[in-house]
Image (cartoon, rainbow, N blue to C red):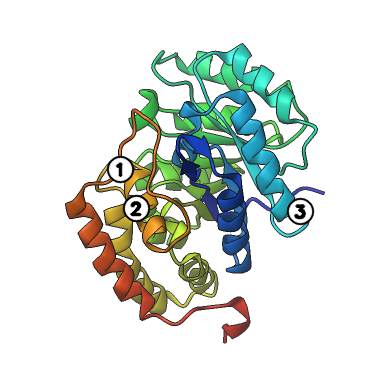
Amino acid sequence: MLTSLHGIWVPLATPMHHGEIDLSRLQHLASGLIKQGVHGLVVCGTTGEAPQLDLAEQGAALAAVLEVAHKRCPVLMGIGGSDTYAAASRVLQFDDMELAGYLVSTPAYVRPSQEGLLRHFDTIAASTGRPIVLYNVPARTGVNLELATAARLARRPQFAAIKEAGGRLCQITGLLEQTPLAVLCGDDALLLSALISGGHGAISASAHIRVDLFVRLYELVEEQRLPEARELFARLLPLIQLMFSEPNPAPLKAALAMQGLLRDELRLPMTPATNACKARIATVLEALDAIPVYTAAEAI
């Protein structure tokens, strides 16, 4: 059965302890998000410091999350890298696990042509029968997955969705108008605009913090209760802006550490958030704590 690739998905941060993955805290983090109503989880995305994890560590992280998510929440596995055949090989390593599919980013650094991107995704997709979520993040990879290329890929039903993080609302609306892909916002600051434009959800790092409110935002837009959605988003926006005020996931890990969910530890070349950033995060978290917890059962 095909999992719905709609709603609010969270790309899990990877807890560390003295340089090693803290699998128990990773499971606790995932379980908490599931209980709060997240629609799906992503393991080994950018927020999870995937480039700093070797293949064995990625497999251990995925297995740990799948253990707590079993039949409760769908899980995507992140696949990155600039070597097409190595990425396709990694898919084979994970394909016997209970996955909703793969989140596959454009290859970083090498800046291929659009034809190269097309062949990159086609080659990886040939390694699996599972759904592929395209991931366009030009600020990190140096190449933009153009609308025409996404439309060509979308002719194959296996390419089911796209995480669009190009920073332009016009690219999101173009995808909605010209492709059958489920369009997931990858720029948290554009979340409300993307949803109002018809976007199908988000893969949101910020949603680690009060994921219940991000789910509520999604539901308010679905119900066309737009004044309430705008009011709620205005309260979330200071958090969103802070989460990306320094390189992700440093501010996020600082916030999660303040909540007692993990240690404020990253792998080089990532470094912890500055003290000034942490002070602002503490203020924003205090403000969010004043908002009552939301569950779907409370919807009017």
**Disc number placed over residue 201 in the picture, else none:** none
**Disc number placed over residue 70 in the picture, else none:** 3
Check if mark 2's residue and mark 1's residue have beta carbons within 8 Å: yes
**Residue ID for mark 1:** 272
Residue nearer the viewer, 237 or 251: 251
Residue 100, horizontal then vertical, whole percent: 71, 44
Mark yes or no: residue 7 visible. Answer: no
Q: Nearer the viewer, mark 1 or mark 3?
A: 1
Which residue occupies 68% across, 25% down? 91
Q: Spot the residue most to the left.
A: 276
Label 2 SS: helix
Residue 16, horizontal then vertical, whole percent: 48, 42
Which residue occupies 43% across, 21% down? 108
Label 3 SS: loop
Q: Quadrant of the C terminus?
A: bottom right
Residue nearer the viewer, 158 or 295: 295
Disc 2 crowd, CA 10 A, few/some/many (<14, 14-19, 20+)? many
Query: Relative to 70, is 174 on the left or the right?
Result: left
**Disc number placed over residue 254 in the picture, else none:** 2
Which residue occupies 56% across, 34% down? 134
Disc 1 crowd, CA 10 A, few/some/many (<14, 14-19, 20+)? many
Disc 3 crowd, CA 10 A, few/some/many (<14, 14-19, 20+)? few
Name the amino acid, label 1.
Pro
Q: Is residue 39 above or below residue 229?
A: above
Check if mark 1's residue and mark 3's residue have beta carbons within 8 Å: no
Name the amino acid, label 3.
His
Label 1 SS: loop
Dot 3 or dot 2, earlier in sequence: 3
- Residue 77, quarter of picture: top right
